[in-house]
Amino acid sequence: MLKDITDKIIHPTVLLDKKKCFANIERMVKKANKYNLALRPHFKTHQSAEIGKWFMDLGVAEITVSSIEMAVYFAKNGWKKIIIAFPINVRAIHQLNELAAQCQLTVLVTNASSMAALTEGIKTPLSFFIEIDTGYGRTGIKPEDLSQISEFINQSKSNDKLKFRGFYVHNGHTYKANSQEEINEIHIGSIRKLKKLKDRFKETFPDIEVQMGDTPSCSTMEHFEYIDAIGPGNFVFYDLVQTGIGSCNVTDIAVAIACPVVDKYPESCEIIIHGGGVHFSKDKLEEEDRTIYGKVVKLDESTWSEPIPNVYISALSQEHGTIKADREFFDSISIGDVVYALPVHACLAVNLHAHYLTLEGEKISRLH
Amino acid sequence: MLKDITDKIIHPTVLLDKKKCFANIERMVKKANKYNLALRPHFKTHQSAEIGKWFMDLGVAEITVSSIEMAVYFAKNGWKKIIIAFPINVRAIHQLNELAAQCQLTVLVTNASSMAALTEGIKTPLSFFIEIDTGYGRTGIKPEDLSQISEFINQSKSNDKLKFRGFYVHNGHTYKANSQEEINEIHIGSIRKLKKLKDRFKETFPDIEVQMGDTPSCSTMEHFEYIDAIGPGNFVFYDLVQTGIGSCNVTDIAVAIACPVVDKYPESCEIIIHGGGVHFSKDKLEEEDRTIYGKVVKLDESTWSEPIPNVYISALSQEHGTIKADREFFDSISIGDVVYALPVHACLAVNLHAHYLTLEGEKISRLH
């Protein structure tokens, strides 16, 4: 059957292994159920109404996104509860009002200025999380800053359109973790801080929630005390970065970029593909002395193989990709063949394509 | 007037300074005229029918692109002569046949296998360049490989649909040049090799052409002996990489990404913008101990300033950008303002957007 797929590849295409993708989704659904967590998956990775439906079919009722544009897209596609896990863009308050009329919207409050603009500008009821920065250092209120947190909560008490929902944390620094111990430390340390916060406000807000986001923690950890909801995104596909962290096995990666072979250079053992920075993005791995923009796999009868050792994308220009190959792989490939490569960072790679092609030959569209 | 533009920015947006862009185009048109070169600009950078028309209005009759998709788009938008400067994708010969029926198409031959597929599959007349690799090392035939070059030419002689046009060179290694001397050396060395080739085949093909592509050489060099046509692309906008190479002044950069400010952190002097890897791409500069994904400018009455020293994008996640600021800039910016940043690599950054917004407020669409 996979021979048929190869026949369909004319230009660079994102292949989606639906079975792997389903398995990734089911595994996370089970984990959420096991620990009594609401799963509010982050849809920034796939950005596809159809893939979204696979989550809906498994009982997911609320989703996380990272832009108003995505929220509008998924609201149009049947989602009734949406969290925009990105600091409020006060220039777009009118859009938030429109959106909040179409779905149960939750936004992220990260500073007093945006909170003031929200309080003043909001016309349609919505909820908010306060983003807490337990160590990542990108955005959010420090958990020690109780006066700021209390102020936000008090502001919402005097505004019948604004409902305080709890705390949101994205421990993005787990993406740079070099060991499971490091992820443990980040995750457990973060929970400890969140517990304190939750306890502090639980009396006034018995329904107070803590939502946590990163794929490495949600994939590897077995401790979710004091956490109510998780919102990982990347796990739907995984990628080489996540494999490196230990969030997944390389066989869990559910997308591969299919690229036509357009040239071969025997002296350097290099294969040139149509597949460049506009198909993979420029995220890269540094492994030993190699810079890697993707690892090459082979199709077998039902899916793709693990990466072929020593065969990887070593350079990308806008449309060209250069594959460094060993002699055996080099000799096995002809100009006009299709080569398949696992992406370093799936979110940014698939964002460059308007469609997915499943191994069964279905075309699945996404926000583009 | 630029106040009006700021009012229009709700989400991350590519701003286009039309005057700078026109000046970049005019400068290259003049240079081509001065040296009696055909200008066949590479449209992979702007990928816009409307910007394409600005070239047409200045007498440009033939263009260069790097994919069949772009060729189809520009053929639909009135271009009659198109060069696809990318190794032939033999899986798409039927599309080449369709395209060749709509415009005077030129393709790039880089290997015997693709040449054979082309010879066999071509039904509509088209022309071809042989790509020559004079040192870049990505794709192309080595200039010493006269037997291969002669073979291609002979194959075309016995095929009435295939017309040999000459040699195409892209000296992409000038992008990594650290000095004007290095660009000189690459450019002049390349011309020397091309001269030999041209002389070798000129008798049989009196109309033989040499086309050369890179923006650094085309922008800075004043020697184009034996060159017949140039096909630079990036110069239409330029960017921080080109400024670093010396291809342009920083004031020539014609695009800036406008990003809403969503958060501020006084302790670290960091400003958070809506503007991430999906708006800038992940190409970066390493300057001293800094990793730079964009340099921040300010709007004045008619355009934007030079980069503000010590104010730059230091990190990008999918939707978030982090600006490292000095205290003065930090204090001058409020949440809800718009910040403008020059891209590191314009081609990949603008590729992520569906439109340009000119400083006059016009929306210009592009292939997306």
Image (tube, coloured by chain):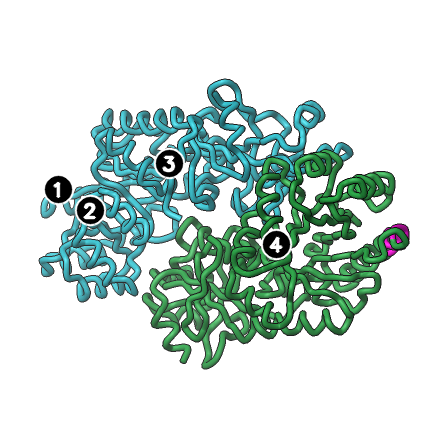
Chain colours: A cyan, B green
Do circles 2 and 1 both sit on a common chain?
yes
- Residue A170's x, y, as percent? 34, 44
Q: Residues within 10 Å of mark 4 (few under 14, many from 20)?
A: some
Earlier sequence position, callout 2 versus callout 3: 2
| Label number found at residue A166 | 2
Q: Residues within 10 Å of mark 1 (few under 14, many from 20)?
A: few
Q: Amino acid at mark 1?
A: Asp
Amino acid type at image mark 2: Gly
B229 is higher (above) or lower (below) than A256: below
The disc placed on residue B103 is 4
A20, above or below A92, in the image: above
Do labels 2 and 1 touch, CB within 8 Å? yes
Tell me, yes or no, whether dots 4 and 3 are on the same chain.
Answer: no
Check residue A144 for magenta coloring.
no
- Are callouts 1 and 4 both on one chain? no
Q: At numbered mark 4, what does the secondary structure look like: helix, strand or loop?
A: loop
Q: Nearer the viewer, mark 2 or mark 3?
A: 3
Q: Position of residue A328 (x, y in %)?
A: 69, 23
Q: The magenta stretch spans which residues? A: B195-201
The foreground one among B273 and B191 is B191
Q: Chain of mark 2?
A: A
Q: Which mark is residue A215?
A: 3
By secondary structure, the bulk of the magenta-drawn segment is best described as helix
Residue A17 numbered tag: none
| Above or below: residue A218 compared with residue B53 | above
Q: Are marks 2 and 4 in contact (CB under 8 Å)?
A: no
Q: Which residue is mark 1?
A: A207
